[in-house]
């Protein structure tokens, strides 16, 4: 019953907005038989697109690992002598440093594989 109460209004909204957006096009757009979609990726090569996605994932995970390292350092500094917080901060810093090592190594491996696959 809950699915019907959520799904029915959502489908009604989607159908009505799609019809309204389609009806607001100009006469030139309605008569267009070939429409072009802009290429936001800047390339059509599959290997380059995959490499970009992987690189962005590496950048994001590296940033998160650095934030965890900083958080661990802040835990350690502001522990006020509490051994539990000191241990928590140390472990966060150690594991994030290990994670950064793996992230760096995976970046090197991906770069080498991309050179091999793309033939550059």
Image: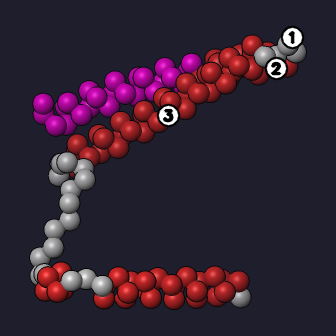
Badge 1 element: loop
Q: Looking at the image, what colour scheme do you see?
A: secondary structure
CA gap between label 1 and label 3 equals 31 Å
Residue on which the image places disc 3: 61
Q: Is residue 55 above or below residue 20?
A: above
Q: Nearer the viewer, residue 65 or 25?
A: 25
For disc 1, the neighbor class at 10 Å (few under 14, some 14 to 19, many from 20) is few
Q: Quadrant of the N terminus?
A: bottom right
Left or right: residue 79 versus residue 15 is right
Foreground tag (1 vs 3): 1
Q: Nearer the viewer, residue 90 or 29?
A: 29
CA gap between label 2 and label 3 equals 25 Å
CA gap between label 1 and label 2 equals 8 Å
Residue at image x 57%, y 18%? 97
Q: Nearer the viewer, residue 118 or 69?
A: 69
Q: Nearer the viewer, residue 24 or 96?
A: 24
Discs 1, 3 touching: Cβ within 8 Å: no
Residue at image x 56%, y 20%? 98
Residue on which the image places disc 2: 85
Residue on which the image places disc 1: 81
Give x and y (percent) for residue 65: 55, 28
Give x and y (percent) for residue 40: 25, 53
Region in magenta: 97-120
Which mark is drawn over residue 44?
A: none
């Amino acid at each position: 019953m809950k699915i019907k109460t959520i799904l029915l209004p959502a489908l009604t909204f989607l159908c009505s907005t799609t019809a309204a957006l389609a009806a607001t096009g100009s006469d030139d757009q309605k008569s267009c038989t070939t429409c072009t979609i802009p290429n936001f990726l800047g390339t059509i090569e599959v290997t380059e697109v995959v490499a970009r996605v992987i690189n962005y994932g590496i950048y994001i995970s590296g940033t998160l690992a650095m934030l965890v390292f900083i958080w661990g350092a802040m835990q350690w500094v502001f522990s006020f002598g509490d051994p539990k917080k000191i241990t928590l901060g140390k472990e966060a810093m150690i594991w994030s440093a290990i994670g950064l090592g793996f992230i760096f190594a995976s970046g090197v491996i991906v770069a080498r594989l991309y050179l091999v696959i793309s033939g550059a």
